[in-house]
Every structure is written in structure tokens, then in C-alpha cells.
């Protein structure tokens, strides 16, 4: 008997595990690059979980009685990567609190908690490696804002962790910090290799 229902078509594309999150401060030079440019040395380290979120903002129009939707228009889109990191380093905490992570490379020292003096955009590349070790998918946000997401959690039964969200920001030449290479993909891309 032939197999029924949804069956695997391309089994080389089954993903197991987490993506590696690579981060560096945004610069004109790296915003001009449309492919993966970061390496494992830019990784924020061990992660407990990762997720990519795409969200559309829509405007619905209703007419008649009873009111029925007669038109739906997409008016916006957002994209973000959320992860929970296990390595509570000074650099990762600074990144989560919106600081420039390259200013906090030493393991010891302080991180300002209430400093909202400026926005520090980062380039984020989430790299997913498939079980064969050669196929990858990369999510690239050339300009993203990192925000801490909730608590720094400590537990007697597990490792301490914190969640961070990288929200993609416009990277096209419509933005003074953007570049023409992103004009067709203003928030970034998802590249399948």
C-alpha cells in the first residue's frame, strides 16, 4: 500500500536543534553586504531556545449588514529573532540592555542598567546548520535592535538564562543608515544554501 497524507519530499531539509546567533555592531561596511559575513567567533554562545517571528499588520474593511470583510490590505511587516541565552557574560547582558556589545568584551566590569542614551543597532545572523553539517539556512538582519525580554532567570534545577529579542529595522537606502543592497529586502533576508 502506498503511503498516504503529507510525506517527506526533501528529507535533507529537516532541522534538528538550535540556530547559532551571530552579532556585531552595525556599520556602513557590513550593511553594504547582502550575504553572511559573520563567523562563529561572533556567536553569543550557548542557547536554550531560538525562534524567528514574522508578523503582518493588516487593515480590514467591512461593509453591508451584517458587516462582512470585503477587503484586507497588508500595511506592514515585522521580523524578529528571539532566543534565550545561557551564557550570562558581560557582553551578552550589555547587548540585551541595548549597549554596544563590542564595548564589553572583558568578562569583568560593569554594565549600565538605566542608560538609554542612544540606540545601538547590531547586525544579526541566525545560522541554522542541518544534520548533514553542510546545508545551512541563514536569517540576516543588517540593522536590528536588541532588547531584553523579561527576566534574568535563576533556578536551583537548571542553568541561569535570559531572553533577548532582535527586532529587524529598515536597512534599505530609504534610511540614512541603510544601503541600496537592501532596497528589495528592507528588513533582511532568509538565505537557503
Image (cartoon, helix red, strand yellow):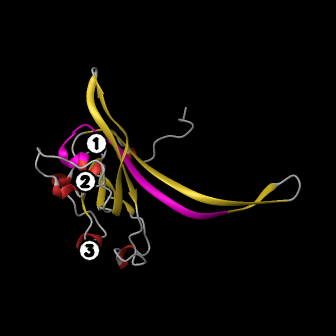
Please report the residue visible at 33 percent of the width from the left and 57 percent of the height from the top. Answer: 116
Residue carrying label 2:
22
Magenta region: 73-93
Work out whether mark 3 precedes mark 1 in sequence or the reverse, and give the earlier one: 3
Q: Is residue 83 magenta?
A: yes
Work out whether mark 2 precedes mark 1 in sequence or the reverse, and give the earlier one: 2
Q: Is residue 82 above or below residue 39?
A: above
Q: Secondary structure at mark 1?
A: loop
Mark 2, mark 1: which one is toward the viewer? 2
Query: Residue 163: x percent and y percent?
Result: 34, 41
Mark 3, mark 1: which one is toward the viewer? 3
Q: Secondary structure at mark 2?
A: strand
- Quadrant containing the C terminus is bottom left
Residue carrying label 1:
131
Is disc 3 in contact with disc 1, using a CB cutoff of under 8 Å? no
Name the main secondary structure of what is drawn in magenta. strand
Please report the residue visible at 42 percent of the width from the left and 68 percent of the height from the top. Answer: 170
Residue sitting at the far top? 157
Residue 13 makes an appearance in the image: yes
Cα distance between the residues tagged 2 and 1 = 20 Å
Work out whether mark 2 precedes mark 3 in sequence or the reverse, and give the earlier one: 2
20 sits left or right of 1 in the view: left
Q: Is residue 95 above or below residue 151?
A: below
Q: How many marks?
A: 3
Q: Quadrant of residue 30?
A: bottom left
32 or 100, which lies in front? 100
69 sits left or right of 24 in the view: right
Amino acid at each position: 500500500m502506498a503511503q498516504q497524507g503529507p510525506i517527506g519530499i526533501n528529507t535533507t531539509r529537516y532541522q534538528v536543534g538550535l540556530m547559532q546567533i551571530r552579532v556585531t555592531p552595525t556599520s556602513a561596511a557590513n550593511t553594504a553586504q547582502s550575504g553572511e559575513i559573520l563567523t562563529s567567533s561572533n556567536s553569543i554562545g550557548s542557547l536554550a531556545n531560538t525562534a524567528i517571528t514574522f508578523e503582518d499588520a493588516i487593515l480590514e474593511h467591512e461593509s453591508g449588514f451584517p458587516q462582512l470583510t470585503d477587503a484586507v490590505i497588508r500595511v506592514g511587516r515585522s521580523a524578529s529573532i528571539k532566543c534565550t541565552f545561557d551564557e550570562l557574560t558581560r557582553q551578552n547582558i550589555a547587548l540585551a540592555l541595548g549597549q554596544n556589545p563590542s564595548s564589553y568584551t572583558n568578562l569583568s566590569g560593569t554594565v549600565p542598567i538605566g542608560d538609554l542614551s542612544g540606540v545601538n543597532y547590531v547586525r544579526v545572523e541566525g545560522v541554522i546548520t542541518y544534520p548533514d553539517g553542510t546545508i545551512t539556512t541563514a536569517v540576516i538582519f543588517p540593522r536590528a535592535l536588541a532588547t531584553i525580554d523579561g527576566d534574568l532567570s535563576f533556578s536551583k534545577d537548571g542553568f541561569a538564562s535570559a531572553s533577548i529579542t532582535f527586532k529587524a529595522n529598515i536597512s534599505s537606502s530609504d534610511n540614512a543608515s541603510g544601503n541600496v543592497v537592501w532596497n528589495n529586502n528592507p528588513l533582511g533576508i532568509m538565505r537557503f544554501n
